[in-house]
Every structure is written in structure tokens, then in C-alpha cells.
Image (tube, helix red, strand yellow):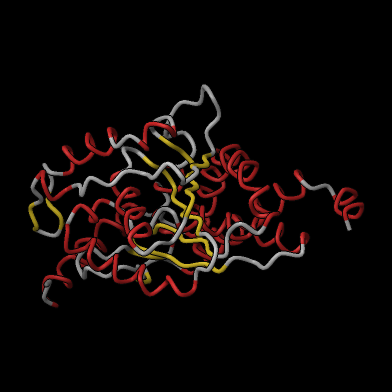
Amino acid sequence: MTVMGEQRDFYNIKKEGFLFERQASVQDAVQDLEKHFTEARPGLRQLAEGLQDSFRAGTYDAIVGEDRSGRLPTLFVRRFAERVANDGGQKVPQVFFVAGGRHLSIPEQRDVLQEYIRTLKSRIQRRALLVTEYIARGVSTGHLAESFEKEGIPFDIAAVSLDCPPEDYYTGEPQKHGAAIASDLTYGGREVSKGEAWSGASIPEDAKIFSGDNPGDSKMVHGLRFHNVQEAHGVWTTPATGEATTIRNWWARPEVVRAAREKIEQIADEIYEELYPKEEIAKAA
């Protein structure tokens, strides 16, 4: 259990680093966003192409985004799903967020996550789509997947970028390697042993993995574009509090957060209209 003083110290440190790194002006921050979004757009389109049939079929009744850096990709997926569902006569999936990341290497935080996922079970009747920005070794995603498995909630995964071929994540080998790295680190002053860092969870074979990568792409080219724009997400993950969800980033300027969310929805609309020209939609109707 983290006491309030430790939480305050943690967020003061985060605030200092955040304020040092963010762009000096709102205009500079928005211009930087435009660059990141332009670079990520091919990956977002590839991801949308992979998901479109499932959205048209009404496969998912929930989209679960892995915060922090997964927030903007989740908003993209939500907007695209909304457009497809509305034109296809399907119900728009509901959206939830969870705090993902390396702090799930701590067993107590996985327990908190499990309790939160349990509260979602009655609200997910068909299948969930877990959305993240970038899967490196898949330790955090594996733990999140394990939480859904334990509650009997079927799911698929959507990532803007993957570090490994999708089939590798089913074997557990990337996760095993990633856990060895995580065990050399500490989180909020908590040392993590090798045995704690990974529960042994991999991605179940009945979970599809969609990504924005094309064959031949250099890895980290799409997803980490969102990791590098901290202010635009508008939220903090909460390793100091141990909560399963994120909190508002009080130092993120509302103008920057709003611009990011408007831009990501604009890109989703543009890609939807590229994939579904108006004349084809009219014919289908």
C-alpha cells in the first residue's frame, strides 16, 4: 500500500519531468502532433483494414484501451468502429480503459487489475477488443489477456505496432524474455523479482492479433509515435496508487489534448471514407 506522501512525491517528480519535456507553446505542441499523426497514419489505416470486417459483423460489444499511450489509438479505433457500426446497422461498442504497462509486473497490481476486469464481465456479452499502442515483448499485454481469460471474457487484440511476429506471442517466449528484463527494474521503489515479473501468461491461440504493421516495416515505426506525445493523451497511469485505471494529467494543456482527440477522430473519418466511398455505402443501403 502506497501512502499519500509517497504518491505526492511520485507525482511531483512526474510533473517536473513532464513540464521539462513538453513543447513550450500550444502551437508548437500541436505542430509536433501533426508530425506524429502523419507518420502513424499508414499503420492506423492498416489496422482499420484488418478490423473492418469484424466491426461490420458486430463481433465486439466492448473496446478496452490500454492506457496511457494506447489512449489515442483506442479513440481512433472507437471512431472507426462507430462509423462502420452506424452505417451497417450494428450497435456501437462501449469503451473502457485500463492502466497497462510495466507496473503489471508487480503481482499486487495484477490483482487490482483482475478485480476491475471482473466488474466488466457483466457488461461484455459477446467479445472484447483490447487496444494498445505497441506490443514489445508482450508481458503487459499477456497479463491483461490473462485477466480476461480468468473471467471467461473472449477477446482479440489490436496494436498499432508489434515488435515480434504475431504468432510468437502465442508461445510465451517473447514474454519470458521481457520478464527477465523487467525483473532488473523497480517500480515506485518496489523491487521486482524474476519470479514475480511474469505470471507465465501468453496470448491464447483463440485470440486474434491485428496490427498496423506491413511486411517489411521496421518495428516501432507506427505505435511509438503515440508514446512520444505524453501531453496529448491527457492522462497519467497510476503505479503510485495501484489503481487499475488512469487519472487525469492536470498539467496537460486542454488545448493540446483537445487538438489530439479531434485529429485522431479526423484521421479515423478519413480512413473510413477511403475504405467505404459514399457511393458504395449508398448502394449497400
Indicate left or right for 247 with 91 as reference.
left
Answer above or below: position of 166 versus 119.
Answer: above
Of residue 113 and residue 275, the one placed in the foreground of this image is: 113
Residue 42: percent from left, percent from top: 60, 37
Number of callouts in the render?
Answer: 0
Q: Quadrant of residue 86?
A: bottom right
Q: Residue at x 27, y 70 (%)?
A: 243
Looking at the image, the residue that sits furthest to the bottom is: 4
Indicate left or right for 251 with 2 as reference.
right
Q: Quadrant of residue 236?
A: bottom left
Answer above or below: position of 191 versus 9.
Answer: above
Of residue 47 and residue 200, the one placed in the foreground of this image is: 200
Residue 181: percent from left, percent from top: 17, 38
Residue 270: percent from left, percent from top: 72, 49
Residue 136: percent from left, percent from top: 34, 38
Quadrant containing the C terminus is bottom right
